[in-house]
Structure formats: structure tokens, C-alpha cells
Image (cartoon, rainbow, N blue to C red):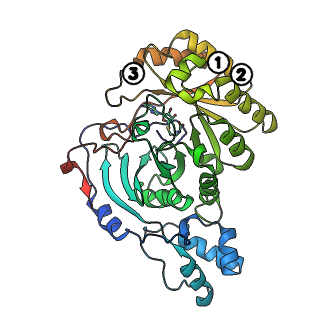
Amino acid sequence: MAAGQPGEAHGQAHGEMATTPGLACYLTDAVMNASSSTARGLTGLTVRDLEVMLGSRTRALVAAHWIYGPRPWTADIPETLPGIAPQAWIRVRDACTLPSIEVTEQAVAADGTTKLLLTLDGGVIETVMIPAATRSTICVSSQVGCTRSCKFCSTATLGFGRNLRADEIVAQYLIARMLAPVATPATNVVFMGMGEPMDNLDEVLVAVDVLTQAPAPQLGRAQVTVSTSGVLPGMQRFLAESHGSLALSLNGTTDAQRTALMPHNKTWPIAALLQLLRDDQRAHPRRIHFIEYVMFDGINDADDDAARIVELLTGINARLNLIPHNPIGTSLLRASPTPRIEAFHRIVSAAGLRCMVRWPRGQDIAAACGQLARVRSRPAADHVDS
Ligand code: SAH
């Protein structure tokens, strides 16, 4: 799932998909060389890393402008960069590679929501660009497949491939931001694509640092949100070490409900997850915690659930996002009917909880929450294959 605000679902797709051949052309050029085992991924370097490699902060800032500044994605590291002594830049060229990523497919919904299928060493991932009224959001993957087994998510059916490196995570943003409409630039990133970010935390923390660093890409800290299915040790570390935002996918108001949907709830039950947020809130009173709540017909959408969620979130500066379940495969799970979602929304809002319904977007290109499995979302004619 993804959005400009955490929880905002992928672009609602109405009507026919369009294709954008121009993108495919330059992305064909963007097939990058595989990195050797010792090479460092250029797009995962912080300004501090660059400073160490280049021997001066001024050079590091120049390099960061080139690596992360707005420009079309390129396959090559240039031989020289104006403003950096050639003998210093050669050290970066020798030590680093750009990640090997190829855009193998893209699908565009009528509202502009665009799903990219990216092929990299060891697998295929998806990245989604979601335009909104004033800005666009890039939804990135943190793993090939996923380490968790949520019953309602199509990524879980793929199993786990491998963790992505920080440079591969940041590269998704650098590639997909070029698709954002000029009037609504990509200012937001959500880690709501494939994967469980807390199971790949070292790389995710670096990626958040890079995305939010000055002078570029310099996204706002509140504009980079990492979503978790509730891996408690990872959440503890994330809250202690990162200045990005956290979203917890709660999806149930009792442990029985939640364990049936998300088996690892047995290990880290609801009370423990929310106690962590409550403790963090005491230390950081102004921090906002996003709570994602996928709504399933007859499972977690009763008035009692609405009352319980209000109680559960007491003491947490929470923003609750209600997400109608997006159908996947042969699953018998159904989305709650719209009137039920609206009634639930009314109950929690009346109790003073900040709450929004994230109506699904991009369903027709399988870009909506939980639909990011490696499926061809439409017949080939609707797509641009490179
Ligand atoms: N593993 C992380 C991030 C990826 S899932 C997490 O669980 O948060 C991103 C969001 O999509 C989560 O809030 C998840 O609950 C939601 N989601 C997954 N499958 C869905 C589906 N089929 N319909 C609606 N939302 C779904």
C-alpha cells in the first residue's frame, strides 16, 4: 500500500491504462552493471560516507548533488564531476557501482498511479508512484518477497527472496520520482511495497538517512514513513535510531483476530506493540504514530472493534488509516462494505481519534495495498516491456 500520507492507498484506477513509452526508452539505458561483492552502492552513500571517500565536505556536497539531485536516472558514473578533483573522484568510481536495476514493466492507471516492475540481482520487486493533489508519493519495496506470512497479502505468497540493499531502496525512489507529474513532485516515500522493513533494518535505516539528508534528496523526516507488520525488536530499534516516521499495521483489535491474519502476532501481541508506541510517546510527545487498519468484512469491522481501537490507542498520538481490503488471489477475505467502513470511521472520529479512510487506488493494475505480487496485471499489450 502507499500514499502521500501514510496509509493513502494506491491510485484509484478508473478506466483504461495508458502506457508511457518514453520512460521505457531511457530506462533501457538505465540497465546498470552488476556490482562486485566488494563494490559499494553509490546510491546508498551518505554525505558523511562521501566525505570520507573524497577527503572534503565541499566535494561530498558536490557529489551528493549529482547522485541525488533531480536528473534522469543514468547507467554510468561520469568520469569527472565539475567541482571535484579528478584524483578524488576516481576513488569513488573505483570503489562504487550503481545498482543493477532494470525496469522490465510498467503499468499506468487512469489517475496516473504507476507501477514499475524492477528486475535486479536475485529477483523482481515493485515500486509504485502515486500522484495526489499537491505532491506524489513513491512506495518502495524493502525485500524481494517477504519474510512474513500475512494471510491477506499477496506478497506473502511469493515467499522470501532476499533483502534489498540501501542503494537499491534509494534507487527505487530515484527512478520512480521521474514519473511524478511536474505539478506534484515526489516529496514522500512510504516503505509499503514488498517486504517487511524491520526484517531488513540495517539497510532500511541507511536508506531513510540518505533520503532525508541535506543537500539532496532532502525529503522531510515526516515525509518518509516505514510501515511494519509489528516486529517488536525492529520497531524498538527504529524508534531509537531513526528520525523517519513509523506506521504500524494493526489490522485487528484482539490477539485472536490479529493472529489469524498475521501469525507473528503470537510472538509480538497487540499489547506489547502498543506499549512500545506509548512509551515512545512519553519520550517524544510530538511524534506522530501512524496506525494502518485493513478492514475485512465480518472480521474486524464491528462497532465493538471501533470502540476497542479507540481504547487501544489511548495515550498514543495516533493517526488511524482505514484501508478497505483489496482482494487477492483466491482468498475468501472480503473488504468491509462501504457503509460499514463509514460507520466505523464515524465511531472512532466521534471518540476524538484522527482517522482517514484510504480508498483503494490502482486496483486495476494490481498496484494497491497487498497486491504487489509478481503478476502481470494486464495482458502484455497494455504494458511497455523493455
Ligand atoms: N510489511 C509492512 C509493509 C508492507 S504492507 C507492513 O505490513 O506494514 C503495507 C500495508 O499494506 C500494510 O498496512 C498492510 O496491512 C497493507 N495490506 C497488505 N495486504 C493488503 C490487502 N490485500 N489489502 C489492503 N491492504 C493490505
Is residue 218 left or right of 3 when viewed as pictured? right
- The residue at which mark 3 appears reads as 333
x and y percentages locating residue 351 in the rendered image = 64, 16
The CA span between labels 3 and 2 is 29 Å
Question: Residue lying furthest left in this view?
Answer: 381
Mark 1 nearby-residue class (10 Å; few <14, some 14–19, many ≥20): some
Q: Amino acid at mark 2?
A: Thr
Is residue 327 left or right of 343 when viewed as pictured? left
- The residue at which mark 1 appears reads as 310
Comparing 307 with 71, the one in front is: 307
The CA span between labels 1 and 3 is 24 Å
Q: Amino acid at mark 1?
A: Val
**Residue at the image point whose x is 61% and y is 60% from the top:** 210
Mark 3 nearby-residue class (10 Å; few <14, some 14–19, many ≥20): some
Mark 2 nearby-residue class (10 Å; few <14, some 14–19, many ≥20): few
Comparing 16 with 169, the one in front is: 169
Q: How many marks?
A: 3
Q: Amino acid at mark 3?
A: Leu
Dots 1 and 2: beta carbons under 8 Å? yes
Disc 3 under 8 Å from ligand 1? The reply is: yes
Circle 2: element type: loop
Q: Earlier in the sequence, mark 1 or mark 3?
A: 1
x and y percentages locating residue 265 in the rendered image = 59, 27
x and y percentages locating residue 338 in the rendered image = 41, 19
x and y percentages locating residue 174 in the rendered image = 48, 61
- The residue at which mark 2 appears reads as 314
